[in-house]
Amino acid sequence: MSIQLTVRKKIMGIAIGLIVLMVLTAILSFVWALRVEHRIQELSNSFIPAYGHLARANIRSLERALALRRMVMVKMQTPVDTAKYEENRELFESKGDEVEKEAQAARDLINSLVEMRKSSADDAIALVRLDGRIGAAITYARQQLNQEIDRLFSALDTGDGKAISDSMTRVDALRDDLIAKLDGIRADMLSLVQADAAATVAQQRQAMIIAAAVTALAALLGLMFALLVSGGITRPVHRLLEGTRAVEAGNLDHTVTVSSRDEIGHLTTAFNRMIEQLRLKEHIRRTFGKYVDPRVVEDLIDHPVLATEGQHRVMTVMFCDVRGFTGIAKETTSEGLVKVMNRYFSVMSAPVRDHGGIIDKYIGDAIMAYWGPPFTEKADQARLASLAALDMQAHIAPLKAEIAELLGMRSLPIAFDIRIGVATGEALVGSIGSEFMMSYTVLGETVNLASRLEGASKLYGTRILASADTIAGAGDTVETREIDRVVVLGETRPQTMYEIMGRKGELTPAQHELKARFAEGLAAYRARRWDDARGAFAAALAMSPDDGPSRVFLKRIEGFMSAPLPDDWDGCWRLDQK
């Protein structure tokens, strides 16, 4: 407990010291900022506006001179435009008043600066001199200009051209003299502004230097205290870090020795407890990973919305069923049947997982699996499902030998094979169930079609039947042959069924010949050329005496020949059973 308090006091001491230094820095910065702000306000509220008023006084003086020239020009015209003359006369008088107003406004601002700068004698004297110069310039110009302008008006009334010209020359000279004086005043004022700005910048730099010095001192003291405190903390922290890395690498057998009773010691104890919990959770995850695919769990964790809403996705669904299961169940004990089914599910599930599929559920002796985002890429799902189906088919012969060995027999006395249906299309993917138990699964017409294709395998005597979308998605990966167009139970839209015969390029010459003859028979069958169809199917059956689809079509043709079909027959066969 004492170590805990000591660490706390050291940390609090560092914090309080840094806070004090920060407050001191903030106060100094605030004081200097107020001074800088005050100088900037003087510049923006007094110096610069006063400078602007003097500049506008120059402009108004020029505008007044322009109005005067226009009056002279109007007066010299014949006949005289009295209205225009009076208009320019009013403009002339108003601009004279504006000159005096701008000058007086500048003087008022300068006087206010004098009041604010009383503490600085040099600044106050310079400002008073500027005020006096402005007053003298305006007073002198007003007297001289007004006298000369009166003489100009008298000359205009008499029409004496020479007198008018001489008077205008004197007026221009007086006006130029006034502008020169105002320019000189503005130049001196600009020098004051620049000097004031330089002083402001200097104050700001001084404030920055002081703030930087105090900050550096705070950093130095904080570093010194931190080094003192960290010496007793870093060692157990390093041990915790090593333990964390071990856990990150998957080593849950690593524990950290508790070497103190302070906060770090409590943290180490909590870390060791966490590892114990992780070991337990890992054991649970591995156990339940046999019941729910871990990828499904991860997807639900990463995308929790799927647990409530689900999504419509293009998926590939597979149903696999055992042919001969009833016979095995009758011939074996309950213990033997459990062994057989566990081995069957293990062998048949391996190709599904090896090809990225998700085992959805085991239904009696049937397996339901699916492929699709996010577990497999959309473009790969049909290909992977087709390859998985072929691998499952290839495992049948070795599995039969294993089952016979499990049952203590030389060979199975009954038929044992599988039937697979694969369909690709849009399906609803999400968690389905009640408030007490949920199942992450796929639903929809695609699932129904895959189940019906698996059932159709029994009717046609095939092992693997797939939908047209599955075959299109599988591309050049597998060898297929079209079997029939059917309307499955529960649907109204015809579906084209294909048998997956093997991997691309692995068919035997006999299988190629079977595929060609069957295709000829199917084309003749759909064209109602019964004799040609029967001959082609018979040739296919001769190539492969166990070919179930050829037998089905030969039997079907015999029925069609005895009972003619309607004219609107579309070549589709309607399946009336699952």
Image (tube, rainbow, N blue to C red):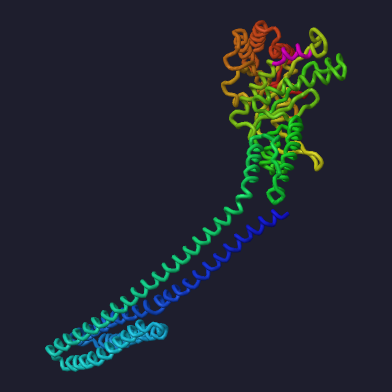
Q: How many marks?
A: 0
Residue 420 on image: x %, y %: 71, 21
Q: Is residue 138 left or right of residue 233?
A: left
Q: State the image quarter where residue 235 is shown.
A: top right
Check the picture and name the quadrant holding the C terminus: top right
Camera-nearest residue between 106 and 13: 13
Residue 241 on image: x %, y %: 63, 42
Relative to residue 351, is residue 256 depicted above or below? below
Find out whether residue 372 is within the magenta segment: no
Relative to residue 551, is residue 31 depicted above or below? below
Q: Is residue 175 left or right of residue 2?
A: left
Residue at the top extreme of this rendering: 542
Camera-nearest residue between 45 and 427: 45
Check the picture and name the quadrant holding the N terminus: bottom right
- What residue lies at 58% left-to-right and 54% top-to-bottom? 226
The region drawn magenta spans 395-403
Residue 402 on image: x %, y %: 76, 13
Q: Is residue 561 visible?
A: no
Q: Is residue 39 left or right of residue 464?
A: left
Identify the main secondary structure in magenta. Answer: helix
Relative to residue 129, is residue 193 depicted above or below? above
- What residue lies at 37% left-to-right and 78% top-to-bottom? 47
- What residue lies at 73% left-to-right and 30% top-to-bottom? 360
Camera-nearest residue between 397 and 140: 140
Residue at the left extreme of this rendering: 162
Residue 537 on image: x %, y %: 66, 10
Camera-nearest residue between 209 and 530: 209
Find out whether residue 396 is within the magenta segment: yes
Q: Is residue 38 visible?
A: yes
Q: State the image quarter where residue 311 is shown.
A: top right
Q: Is residue 233 left or right of residue 146?
A: right
